Amino acid sequence: MARYLISFADGTMNLSPDELAQAAVDSHAVVDEAKQAGVWVFGAGIDSGEVSGVTVSTDGRAVPITEPARRPPVGGFSIVDVASYEEACGWAAKIAAGCRCEQEVWELMPDDAM
């Protein structure tokens, strides 16, 4: 088994409120399906509001990210643990349909200590 990051770019879910509500229902249905299949690890949307996060330096100092140009490139992500790249792409297709936007698929590096 390998873990894959399935993600979409920030700003790609340009949906009306009604469309967004239905996309949430459909996306949650895919998550439920992935959980029942035993492949779901974790997922979330990223809040790209006025202050979208912080940059933390090596000395632990945190600086709020407020410039629009530095907002997160990722709008949301899912992590699945599946047997193959093809299976990950199959889940990405289901997520894309639920979210109404294209998804990228990246294999995560294995780390036995994790």
Image (tube, rainbow, N blue to C red):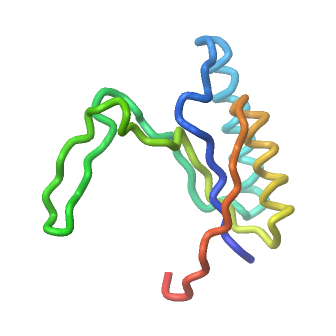
**Residue 57, relative to residue 43: is it above or below?**
below
Can you tell which quarter of the image residue 4 is in?
bottom right
**Residue 108, relative to residue 24: is it above or below?**
below
Position of residue 111 measured from the top left corner of the image (x, y, whole percent): 55, 83
Position of residue 56 measured from the top left corner of the image (x, y, whole percent): 23, 57
Can you tell which quarter of the image residue 42 is in?
bottom right
At x 69%, y 49%, the residue is 104
Can you tell which quarter of the image residue 47 is in?
top left
Count the marks: 0
In the displayed structure, does residue 56 sit left or right of residue 97? left
In the displayed structure, does residue 64 sit left or right of residue 79? left
Position of residue 98 measured from the top left corner of the image (x, y, whole percent): 74, 34
Which is nearer the eye, 71 or 31?
Answer: 71
At x 55%, y 42%, the residue is 76
In the displayed structure, does residue 51 sit left or right of residue 98? left
At x 76%, y 49%, the residue is 92
At x 30%, y 43%, the residue is 53
Q: Residue furthest front?
A: 69
Q: Residue furthest bottom?
A: 112
Which is nearer the eye, 82 or 53?
Answer: 53
**Residue 1, relative to residue 99: is it above or below?**
below
Position of residue 6 measured from the top left corner of the image (x, y, whole percent): 66, 52
The quadrant in which the N terminus is found is: bottom right
**Residue 92, relative to residue 37: is it above or below?**
above
